[in-house]
Image (cartoon, rainbow, N blue to C red):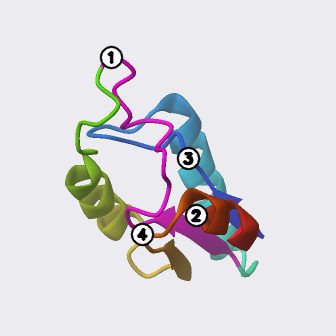
């Protein structure tokens, strides 16, 4: 089962992210192989971190990555590294 949640966090966990995380944990506990696709500054533009009033402002990736490192600890994770937007979407 592959999980990708682009609405997970910037500092907290959204309701959608919580359901996704609980679902993945439940499947893992049942022995179902799971894979998480997680961003490591690879989503440009970021659906969460882009300030629509100031598009050129740096993204708030550090907090998001730290939380991903924590909640996906022990899971099979593939990280999306920084890259041009057209390449990110083709990889997904």
- Point out the stretch of residues depicted in magenta: 34-53
In the image, 5 versus 87, the foreground residue is 87
What residue would you read off at disc 1? 53
Estimate the spatial distance between the alpha carbons at disc 3 and disc 4, rounded to whole Å: 15 Å
Name which residue lies at 42% across and 69% down.
Answer: 82
Estimate the spatial distance between the alpha carbons at disc 1 and disc 4, rounded to whole Å: 23 Å
Residue 25 badge: 2
Name which residue lies at 48% across and 51% down.
Answer: 44
Q: Is residue 48 left or right of residue 4?
A: left
Categorize mark 4 by other alpha carbons within 10 Å: few (<14), some (14-19), many (20+).
some
| Mark earlier in primary sequence (3, 4) | 3
What residue would you read off at disc 3? 6
Name which residue lies at 26% across and 39% down.
Answer: 11
Residue 1: quarter of image: bottom right
Categorize mark 1 by other alpha carbons within 10 Å: few (<14), some (14-19), many (20+).
few
| Mark earlier in primary sequence (2, 3) | 3
- Tell us which disc is closer to us: 2 or 3: 3
* Residue 21 screen position, x and y as percent: 55, 53
Categorize mark 3 by other alpha carbons within 10 Å: few (<14), some (14-19), many (20+).
some
- Tell us which disc is closer to us: 3 or 4: 4
What residue would you read off at disc 4? 82
């Amino acid at each position: 089962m592959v999980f990708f949640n682009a609405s997970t966090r910037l500092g907290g966990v959204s309701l959608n992210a919580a359901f996704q995380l609980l679902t993945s944990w439940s499947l893992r506990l049942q022995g179902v192989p799971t894979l998480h696709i997680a961003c490591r500054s690879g989503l440009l533009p970021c659906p969460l971190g882009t300030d629509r009033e100031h598009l050129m402002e740096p993204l708030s990736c550090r907090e998001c990555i730290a939380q991903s490192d924590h909640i996906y600890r022990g899971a099979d994770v593939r990280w999306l590294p920084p890259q041009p937007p057209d390449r990110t979407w083709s990889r997904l």
